[in-house]
Amino acid sequence: MFHPIIAPQLHRFHHGTHHVGKTPRHHSFAYRKEELRAALAHAVSTEDFEQAALLRDQLTALASL
């Protein structure tokens, strides 16, 4: 309904209608948690328990932020 009216304004002011800036901080934390969880699962499956303990500690530290 308002798109035909607002879209040209957005293009003129912001040079587009899609966000191209930084990602929100919480998004990067979620991505980092997923990376750590995957690495932890791999470390456990390969029985690299020292690495698994380090990854577990990193996950714990990240959760406390």
Image (spheres, rainbow, N blue to C red):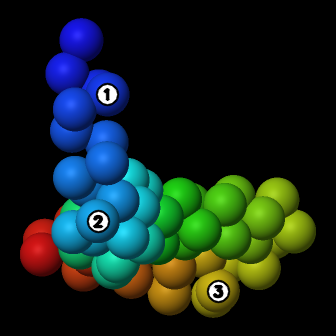
Is 44 on the left-hand or right-hand side of 36? right
Secondary structure beneath label 3: helix
Relative depth, front residue between 44 and 35? 35
Q: Which mark is residue 4?
A: 1
Q: Callout 2, which amino acid?
A: Arg
The residue under the point 13% across, 71% down is: 64
Q: Which mark is residue 13?
A: none
Viewer-nearest of discs 3 and 1: 1
Distance between the alpha carbons at the discs numbered 3 and 2: 52 Å
Secondary structure beneath label 2: helix
Q: Which mark is residue 51?
A: 3
Is 64 on the left-hand or right-hand side of 61? left
Q: Which mark is residue 12?
A: 2
First in sequence: mark 3 vs mark 1:
1
- The residue most toward the left is 65
Secondary structure beneath label 1: helix
x, y percent for residue 11: 35, 59
x, y percent for residue 35: 59, 68
